[in-house]
Image (cartoon, rainbow, N blue to C red):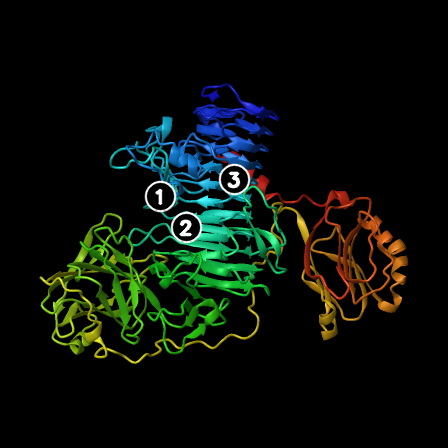
Amino acid sequence: MIMKNFTSVHLSYVELKRMGQQQMGRYPVHFHLCGDVDYKGGYRHATFVDGLSIHHSFSRCITVHGTNGLLIKDTIGFDTLGHCFFLEDGIEQRNTLFHNLGLLTKPGTLLPTDRNNSMCTTMRDKVFGNYIPVPATDCMAVSTFWIAHPNNNLINNAAAGSQDAGIWYLFHKEPTGESTGLQLLAKPELTPLGIFYNNRVHSNFKAGLFIDKGVKTTNSSAADPREYLCLDNSARFRPHQDANPEKPRVAALIDRLIAFKNNDNGAWVRGGDIIVQNSAFADNGIGLTFASDGSFPSDEGSSQEVSESLFVGESRNYGFQGGQNKYVGTGGIDQKPRTLPRNRTFPIRGFQIYDGPIHLTRSTFKKYVPTPDRYSSAIGFLMKNSWQITPRNNISLVKFGPHVSLNVFFGKPGPWFEDCELDGDKNSIFHDIDGSVTGYKDAYVGRMDNYLIRHPSCVNVTKWNAAICSGTYAQVYVQTWSTQNLSMTITRDEYPSHPMVLRGINQKAAFPQYQPVVMLEKGYTIHWNGPAPRTTFLYLVNFNKNDWIRVGLCYPSNTSFQVTFGYLQRQNGSLSKIEEYEPVHSLEELQRKQSERKFYFDSSTGLLFLYLKAKSHRHGHSYCSSQGCERVKIQAATDSKDISNCMAKAYPQYYRKPSVVKRMPAMLTGLCQGCGTRQVVFTSDPHKSYLPVQFQSPDKAETQRGDPSVISVNGTDFTFRSAGVLLLVVDPCSVPFRLTEKKVFPLADVSRMEEYLKTGIPPRSIVLLSTRGEIKQLNISHLLVPLGLAKPAHLYDKGSTIFLGFSGNFKPSWTKLFTSPAGQGLGVLEQFIPLQLDEYGCPRATTVRRRDLELLKQASKAH
């Protein structure tokens, strides 16, 4: 244990084995309440931990407790119990974790968040009364990097094999443990994120990266029997300048995250503003999920964006059974055995939309291939979603590879999706800004059975379970008071035979809430499966100035009303500019005066009609106007206990013929220009250059059909259609690439290739070789050994042969030989070859820019 007021602490290259105990404070390395340990604390040489090997620890790796400005670098934590790199009380700031590796982080017993399922339910000595903890919400959060305050720096780290998460950012409502009361003004939820750059997370169960939640900061009691410091869902990350919500937002930047082979989520990110860029997600159950900062009306207009990123459904990383890899089945383009994220029926998704608003742009999706047992889609939605979804979810400039069968999927009843009948399921929607998803520019995509958003010209895509529609859309936030277990039915006047039934959020609370997405400039009626609410609030959500809809709410015929309008101020809950609605005598009069505060009650049908029309401008991503949330309050006086459903009387009287308000665009033709990420290679060594190489090797039938054989080098295709061998020689020291020789050996002259392989290839060269057609005798395997082949191979009667080699004194690990049986091809093979390595004998290049080292220097100066 290292305590405050030390002269200096610099730990370097120490092995710590089987240390720590399952007791508080007993850890291999423990900085305990040291305060500022950098220049801010008066230290001429900042405190650091460098090059430690911590393995088979019985409790954590390194604990940073009440300590700021510490540097932890080049340290390994392997096979440990409880959170490994652990920031404890929620006040630790300005610490930098650089180039560390955490492997195999297992559950521990110290904190509820350390525990697994069985520990959570059996360790109950600190709960109140007979409370039984719920593992999924109280515990099960053990993480390799447990970051309890956002103002810390993570650069070049890797986290793999954690029982729950690789990296977990959480947000304390107040300091905990021995730091309670020390920094009451430290607001983790509002504090801007430190540096996050080039971190890798893989083979974790719950998530690679998790940004969400907090911990319970009160002791167990009758009011809340949960244990102190158990997981808590109350925190939301809302970074602002100087941690002041009155000042501008400061977007949290997640730059260069690589997440693969995580069972559930590659990354789950809640809060805003948050930007994910230059990142890659592969072989996860779900690549990336964005969850919003909060729900209306507390949301302040935050947003999330992902750009310049790559999503791969199932790569050639087949995995190995064991450890976290509990599920095995067939999948991928080649339908070979592989580890699966959940089981063989789990629907794989690349980018998952939850609520929003989000913007997905300049990203590429590859290899989302369904099987007979499961769906696999590039874009999907949170399953069994009871929450709201905003039509301000925007997608643009995305690209889908040839092996993406479902660009988007809205789910269908069945395994995992269940009945697909929750409110968020029904209202799933996004805006295809440029048509890069659907082929229709400025179109909205919703569920095929959602008639609140449809019109006669919508285009159905059955395999997506989607309808593509033009129009403008918003939401109505309906809140009722003193009602429980009340379902709301909303019907558009043009489609009365297709109502939407909403169960509502907080059904058992005193104020259930419903939030349907609606097409603007249309009429709707609202009905209930019980007595009409005495108090109902209607909020205009995502309405721009002068946007409108007409609503008719069902009440008993003897009801009297008081209807008021006002602007709700979200920060303090006050109401301003209150106006009374006045009754009119006909619907025609109401239509003439729709910009005024009027209502019309048709006692013959029981419908109270009024127009919801926005008076003020809305800015940015705010749900509400700049003046506040425009709200209509309806207070109804009636003695009736009857079910308030007016459908039978409302229609056909108020039926309207379906019409198109905004014309459906023509379908785009041609390829999307500028779509997809501009990056070709995603790597944990971004300062290195790589050469992307792709081989297309057709089988006999495809060859007879005329399909070409192709070697593609950095996007440049070299094609050959006649039987024989294509051989390319590339300079390994040039970026992006320099072709030094191209040789084609027809079938009749294949024997000439032997001499070329012996004497024609210059030293320090990359060799790319591909055959076409069946070559009975390819006597070159002994000549490939000097180019990197481990030993001579049998190359007779092969359908296809592909070879990657290197001419020089160095044998790189990327040299490979691929062959297929007679009549068969090798399909598409992709490799990434590193360039300009010292081992190749390349001339020393000019200094390579190291963004990671620049950021480390920046973090050190910030101390």
**What residue is disc 2 on?**
273
Amino acid at pointer 3 = Ser
Describe the element under mark 1 as helix, strand or loop. Answer: loop
- Residue 548 in the image: state x and y as whole percent: 27, 69
- Label 1 CA crowd tier, 10 Å (few <14, some 14–19, many 20+): some
- Say above or below: 441 vs 69: below
User: At which x and y percent is residue 618?
Assistant: 31, 60
Q: Is residue 359 left or right of residue 554?
A: right
Circle 1 residue? 233
- Quadrant position of residue 16: top right
Q: Secondary structure at mark 3?
A: loop
User: Which of disc 2 and disc 3 is earlier in sequence?
Assistant: 3
Q: Is residue 455 above or below residue 4?
A: below
Local packing at callout 3 (Cα closer than 10 Å; few below 14, some 14-19, many 20+) is many
Q: Nearer the viewer, mark 3 or mark 1?
A: 3
Whether residue 727 sits left or right of residue 235 in the image: it is: right
Residue 354 seen in the current view? yes
Instruction: Judge by depth and name the residue closer to the eye, 798 or 727.
Output: 798
User: Are the residues at dot 2 and dot 1 in contact (C-beta closer than 8 Å)?
Assistant: no
